[in-house]
Image (cartoon, grey):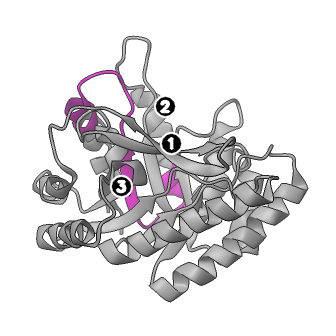
Amino acid sequence: MRYVSLTSWSLNRLLGPLYWSKWNQQKKDIETFIDEQPEIHSLLDLPALLAEKGFQAMEIIHPHVPSTDTEYLKKLHKATQKAGIRFYNLLIDYGDITNEDPVRRKRDMDFIKSWIDIASKVGAENVRVIGGDAKPDDKKALQLAALQLMELCAYAKKKGVGVLTENFHSLTSTSENCLFLYEQTDITGLISDFGNFSGPSKFQSLSETIPNSTSIHVKALSNKDGSINKSELLQCLDLVEQANYDGPLTIVYDGPNDMWQGIEEVKEIVQRYII
């Protein structure tokens, strides 16, 4: 069954400050820097708001979580349960599991594990782990990514959380590398993001990763005037249908126009592919 989901990134100008994680090479540690944004909606109100608008699931990027205090996480979990919506995926937007610096690599792995703990507490079914920032032709890094993902999968399994990776960042910018990590590790599945493959091989790459995906990020490209490139989006969604994909179709609106308007425009198209 396919159903409509939304990532919190689609509302990145409406959900308040973003708490980005960044490596400080001088201090050899991870720092948080704040990107101030208007808080039109609070994260605690998001599950009910999405349910009201007809979404069956949501994915939240970790920088949108304003507090990791136990009480706040309980409130978020309760809000999700009360809304009757699935917290399908917590998107961990930091961590280079293939970094050559062993100090950073260890620190990043610990960071990811801490967010797996958080995912478990808030009732998220999965976490998205970035495959790595190494170059896509770095076979040694690809093997390292597989080993690191296996460690994270074992850790997450004890917490009742699945691990996904995505065609996101350098190492997993090719379908070949995505499929290698899918086949050589215990990850629950891939995320195929329509906007993260590019060039003449884009549709071929998507056709290769979608059959092994448990989440699709429906990211519509924008035309020069800011409108949605509907024909390109339909081509991508046709690949989903051809693969008999079963799972969430998660809208990722990243255009310059009104965010809710853009989301609803993409959602209207996505609804044609819901079975």
Q: Which residue sits at x=52%, y=88%? A: 158
Q: Does residue 5 appear left or right of residue 235 in this picture?
A: left
Circle 2 packing at 10 Å, graded few (<14), some (14-19), many (20+), is some
Of pointers 3 and 1, the one earlier in the residue sequence:
3
Residue named by callout 1: 236
Q: Does residue 218 appear left or right of residue 106 in this picture?
A: left
Residue named by callout 3: 60
Q: Does residue 274 appear left or right of residue 112 in this picture?
A: left
The amino acid sitting under disc 3 is Ile
Q: Which residues are magenta?
A: 239-264
Alpha carbon of mark 1 to alpha carbon of mark 2: how far? Answer: 7 Å
> Which percent across, then down, holds residue 128?
52, 61
Residue named by callout 2: 232
Quadrant, the N terminus: bottom left
Q: Are the residues flagged by discs 1 and 2 in contact, CB closer than 8 Å?
A: yes
Secondary structure of the residue carrying tag 3 is: strand
The amino acid sitting under disc 2 is Glu
Q: Is-magenta flag for residue 262?
A: yes
The amino acid sitting under disc 1 is Cys
Q: Does residue 42 appear left or right of residue 153 in this picture?
A: left
Number of on-image labels: 3
The image quarter containing residue 265 is: top left
Alpha carbon of mark 2 to alpha carbon of mark 3: how far? Answer: 25 Å
Q: Are the residues flagged by discs 2 and 3 in contact, CB closer than 8 Å?
A: no
Mark toward the viewer: 2 or 3:
3
User: Front-most of 121 and 187?
Assistant: 121
Circle 1 packing at 10 Å, graded few (<14), some (14-19), many (20+), is many
Secondary structure of the residue carrying tag 1 is: helix
Q: Is residue 120 above or below residue 56?
A: below
